[in-house]
Image (tube, rainbow, N blue to C red):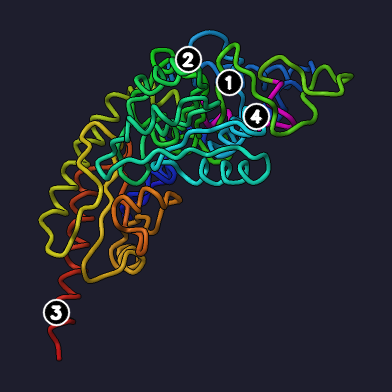
Amino acid sequence: MHNDDIVYLDFAATAAIRPAAVTRAIVEYLEGVGATPGRGGHRLAVESGRVALRCRMAIARLLGIAGDPGRIAFMFNATHALNTALYGTLRAGDAVVVTVFDHNAVRRPVHALARERGVRVRRVEGDADGRLDMEGLRRALDGARLFVINAASNVLGTRLDVEALAALARDAGVISLVDSAQAAGHLPFDTAASGVDLVAFTGHKGMLGPHGIGGLWVREGIGVDPLLRGGTGGNSLLPGMPDAYPDHLEAGTQNAPAMAGLLAGIEFVLDQSVERIATHARALKARLRAGLADVPGIRLRSPAAPDGAPIVTFTADTVDPNTLAARLDRQHGVLVRPGLHCAPDAHRLLGTEATGAVRMSLGWASTETDVDRAVGAIRAILADETVAASIP
């Protein structure tokens, strides 16, 4: 999708602007293959399996995953992957360590696990600059089973030091699970170097793929029980799910057209390089922050985080976030996301838990013109508010 009449600044939600190759790959798959991976030995099923394997290998390359790409199991999205990891590793009485930066894709499953299995939830606090309470973390890790690491906050745009945190977990004998939704494709991420045990990812954000595709990587030697159970295309006599990956976690017909689209999206990202995309988006982020800081009545809420995700979160003194976002869309064609962004604890750190905030997030297709149009639109809206307030 590309429309010169709009400015799309919601890449943290989804990459609604994708390379044309993604659409072509999906159409070509549906027209030329159409079969399901692992379901039959005929030529179309075999070709479908090749697409799935190439996609796993591309994911491994993008995320720095070493070893068997079959340890990458396809799922609907990062939420599905996080639920699989949480429900598949935590038993009655286990302790799970989470942080104030977590998305509801983590908060809600652990809340349910506490109620259903008596899992003990240990939440580690942090601050509005994206720093964790490290002493609190060390205490929380003692005797825990699993530690969830939010690679990049979808509200603050800050990054956690995944490698250092994974090392702390490893020293404490705790499994580490990374939520890479705002990092994969957006920021350089090396799974092998980080030393983590599990990585959940989604395809429709920084990987530039379609909706409905994501996955979970599981380190060799880590056991995860399947969230879903059913047909896998092989070993049909087994009453339970096969032990071998990825079948162990992939029940039912997988979204093969989305795999084709995701493969094309990742190939585009790899060709451009994640570092180049991240550098481009960070420069635009700095320009956006500077422009917003110069608009009277705008309060920047998220920190500068120059090495973080390309996210800027802010509020206006005279217009609530929902109204501001609606006016940006209707009057200026600037598309942003208001609200709590499914991460209320992060908004508590910013002091915006009661009102929410406006989030602008940049991506591979964002330009300086987009940034300048967005800043100009906000300036115009707030100027209108000032004039309206001055009329008796």
Most extreme residue toward the top is 67
Most extreme residue toward the right is 237
Q: Which residue is mark 3?
A: 387
The quadrant holding residue 295 is bottom left
Q: Which residue is mark 2?
A: 65
Q: Amino acid at mark 1?
A: Ile
Taking 147 as reference, is 242 left or right? right
| Alpha carbon separation for disc pair 4 and 1 | 15 Å
Element marked by disc 4: helix
Considering only order in the chain, which callout, 1 or 2, is on the residue closer to the N terminus? 2
Q: Nearer the viewer, residue 303 or 123?
A: 123
Residue 254 colored in magenta in the image: yes
Considering only order in the chain, which callout, 1 or 4, is on the residue closer to the N terminus? 1
Q: Measuring from the top left, give residue 191's x and y in whole percent.
A: 43, 18
Taking 378 as reference, is 187 left or right? right
Q: Amino acid at mark 2?
A: Ile
Front position among marks 3 and 2:
2
| Residue 82, numbered circle | none
Query: Magenta region's main secondary structure?
Result: helix
Q: Which residue is mark 1?
A: 72
Q: Measuring from the top left, give residue 53's x and y in whole percent.
A: 60, 17
Q: Measuring from the top left, give residue 234's x and y in whole percent.
A: 80, 18
Considering only order in the chain, which callout, 3 or 4, is on the residue closer to the N terminus? 4
The residues colored magenta run 247-263
Q: Which residue is mark 4?
A: 88
| Alpha carbon separation for disc pair 4 and 3 | 57 Å
Q: Measuring from the top left, give residue 135's x and y in whole percent.
A: 33, 30
